[in-house]
């Protein structure tokens, strides 16, 4: 019974984000293989890319699921660990993983989706590849701001004066990166190529959100050492 409970605990303790990654990755992988086997030429290649991206997202979801479970296991082993410490540790792990995932998705979009869009041969998947980094950037920003579901449901454990100080510093750094990035994007759009200016704004948004998440994690650990 204990083993069954441990196995079930992986999914029972998974965050909504882990479930979304695993579910979305599985659907994309199955759809890519199912439709790709019947297609030919560029269409088959497109479904192959979809299947590959789905496998990557599914793998990231499994890693995220393992991180959630290990955090719960460590908290249980400590025995005296409070719910506050457990939830804050989970938030820190998420803000460490998601910015790198956003950067990875942006690199994939820059390598695959952007060339097709600029050449006028874009398909739906190309626009979707550009949308994903922006979506992840918003998720990271929402977590730093405390707008995500977990923070709203557990506000009395995840909101304190130290969190507010860390949030303010993280957002200040992110805002500086965003201002610099958008300024560069405007310069590229006005004086060089409007299309490249829009592309540069995607990099600015991703860089700003990654700065917010990683700065939050770094400050949280630094204050933890001082404590």
Image (spheres, rainbow, N blue to C red):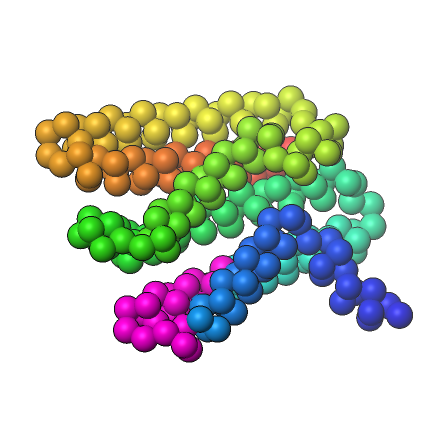
Task: Assess whether residue 53 is covered by the magenta stretch.
Answer: yes
- Quarter of the image for residue 39 reads bottom left
Of residues 223 and 57, the one drawn nearer to the viewer in this rendering: 57
Q: Position of residue 170 (x, y in %)?
A: 48, 29
Q: Is residue 182 visible?
A: yes
The answer to which image quadrant residue 70 occupies is bottom right
Indicate whether 54 appears above or below 223.
below
Residue in the image at 24% along x and 50% along y: 117
Q: Is residue 170 left or right of residue 130?
A: right
Q: Is residue 181 above or below residue 112?
A: above
User: In which quarter of the view is residue 192 placed?
Assistant: top left
Residue 51 image offset from top left, x and y in percent: 44, 67
Q: The N terminus is located in which quarter? A: bottom right
How many marks do you count on the picture? 0
Q: Residue at x 28, y 28 (%)?
A: 182
- Say if residue 222 shows up in the picture: no
Q: Give the dominant element type of the magenta stretch: helix, strand or loop.
A: helix
Could you tell me which residue is drawn at 56 percent across and 23 percent down?
Answer: 165
Residue 172: give x, y in percent of width and height. Answer: 43, 24
- Magenta span of residues: 36-57
Left or right: residue 210 versus residue 180 is right
Residue 154 lies in magenta, yes or no?
no
Residue situated furthest left in the rendering: 191
Q: If the image is split into quadrants, where does the C terminus sit?
A: top right
Residue at the farthest bottom position: 37
Q: Residue at x 62, y 42 (%)?
A: 91
Residue 189, position in %: x, y?
Answer: 17, 31
**Vertical relation: 19 (above or below) 92:** below
């Amino acid at each position: 019974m204990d083993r069954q409970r441990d196995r079930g605990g992986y999914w029972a303790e998974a965050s909504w984000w882990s479930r979304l990654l695993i579910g979305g990755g599985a659907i994309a992988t199955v759809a890519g293989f199912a439709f790709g086997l019947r297609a030919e030429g560029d269409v088959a290649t497109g479904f192959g890319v979809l299947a590959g991206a789905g496998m990557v997202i599914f793998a990231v979801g499994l890693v995220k699921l393992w991180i959630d479970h290990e955090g719960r296991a460590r908290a249980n082993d400590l025995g005296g660990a409070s719910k506050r410490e457990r939830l804050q540790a989970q938030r820190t792990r998420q803000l460490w993983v998601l910015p790198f995932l956003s950067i990875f998705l942006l690199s994939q979009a820059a390598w695959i989706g952007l060339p097709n869009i600029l050449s006028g041969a874009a398909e739906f998947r190309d626009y979707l590849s550009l949308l994903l980094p922006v979506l992840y950037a918003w998720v990271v920003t929402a977590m730093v701001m405390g707008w995500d579901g977990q923070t709203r449901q557990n506000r009395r454990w995840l909101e304190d004066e130290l969190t507010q100080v860390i949030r303010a510093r993280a957002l200040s750094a992110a805002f500086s990166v965003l201002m610099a990035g958008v300024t560069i994007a405007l310069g590229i759009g006005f004086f060089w190529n409007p299309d490249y200016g829009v592309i540069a704004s995607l990099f600015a948004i991703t860089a700003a959100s990654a700065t917010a998440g990683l700065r939050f994690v770094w400050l949280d650990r630094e204050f933890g050492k001082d404590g």
